[in-house]
Image (cartoon, rainbow, N blue to C red):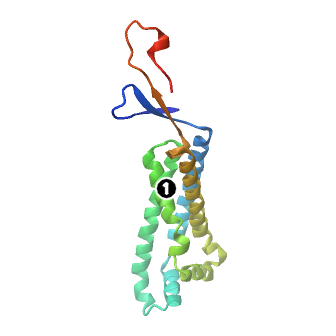
């Protein structure tokens, strides 16, 4: 589970291995656990907080002409987007078992976009959620959006430091062509 060879094109007897660092498993656990929390928080926000009443309040505060007629369609749209984030966050739980680059980039994309919630969600939604539910109305979205920003920053720092996904270290091994009958000292060089 510690190494994974990646062969470079055109290089004879050369392989690049991704080696687990002490940070790798910690990062996997952090990503997996954050993804689990964000999945739950997004589901609560999507199916408990967001409803027609909240959307109508939000639309009235924004000056919409007919919020009662528009709210059901807008609520459906918000819930569809929310379901996509629930699926994306749920896929991030795979980080607990996998160091797949696909999982890394999916988690990164989901958290980059979810972290934009503070700027994308109109202030009238925050006000309506607070008016309807009190402070608890904004907690799920604040945790998922704020947490997504922090997780994205952590992932960016890991990519900058290690230049690979999952804070792995890239190791290149190079060997000279082996000649039958030659001594072990001349069979290969490690670099």
**With 70 as the anchor, is 164 left or right in this view?**
right
Circle 1 residues within 10 Å: few <14, some 14–19, many ≥20: many
Residue occupying image coordinates x 57% and y 82%? 128
Residue occupying image coordinates x 41% and y 69%? 80
- In the displayed structure, would residue 68 be above or below residue 112? below
- In the displayed structure, would residue 20 be above or below residue 35? above
Residue occupying image coordinates x 41% and y 85%? 70
Q: Which of 88 and 156 is in front in this view?
A: 156
Residue 36 in view of the camera: no
Q: Nearer the viewer, residue 129 or 22?
A: 22
**With 49 as the anchor, is 106 left or right in this view?**
left
Pointer 1: what residue? 108
- In the displayed structure, would residue 25 be above or below residue 123? above
Whole-percent x, y for residue 106 in the image: 45, 54
Whole-percent x, y for residue 104 in the image: 48, 49
Q: Which of 27 and 69 is in front in this view?
A: 27
- In the displayed structure, would residue 186 be above or below residue 174? above
- Please identify the residue farthest to the right as the structure is shown: 135
Corner quadrant of residue 28: top right
Whole-percent x, y for residue 179 in the image: 37, 12
Corner quadrant of residue 149: bottom right
Whole-percent x, y for residue 29 in the image: 59, 46
- Please identify the residue farthest to the left as the structure is shown: 10
Q: Nearer the viewer, residue 170 or 91?
A: 170
Residue occupying image coordinates x 45% and y 58%? 87
Residue 189 in view of the camera: yes
Q: How many marks?
A: 1
Please, what secondary structure does the residue beneath circle 1 have? helix
**With 164 as the anchor, is 181 left or right in this view?**
left
């Amino acid at each position: 589970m510690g190494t994974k060879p990646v062969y470079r094109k055109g290089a004879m007897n050369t392989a690049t291995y991704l080696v687990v660092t002490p940070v790798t498993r910690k990062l996997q656990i952090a990503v997996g656990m954050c993804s689990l929390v964000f999945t739950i928080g997004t589901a609560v926000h999507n199916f408990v907080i967001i409803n027609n009443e909240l959307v109508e309040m939000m639309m009235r505060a924004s000056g919409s002409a007919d919020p009662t007629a528009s709210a059901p369609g807008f609520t459906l749209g918000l819930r569809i987007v929310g379901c996509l984030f629930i699926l994306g966050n749920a896929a991030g739980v795979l980080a607990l078992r996998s160091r797949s680059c696909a999982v890394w980039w999916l988690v990164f994309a989901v958290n980059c976009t979810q972290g934009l919630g503070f700027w994308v969600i109109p202030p009238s939604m925050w006000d309506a959620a607070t008016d309807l539910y009190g402070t608890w109305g904004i907690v799920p979205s604040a945790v998922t959006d704020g947490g997504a920003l922090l997780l994205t920053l952590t992932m960016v720092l890991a990519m900058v430091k290690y230049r690979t996904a999952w804070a792995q270290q890239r190791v290149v091994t190079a060997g000279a062509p082996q000649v039958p009958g030659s001594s072990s000292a001349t069979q290969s060089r490690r670099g």
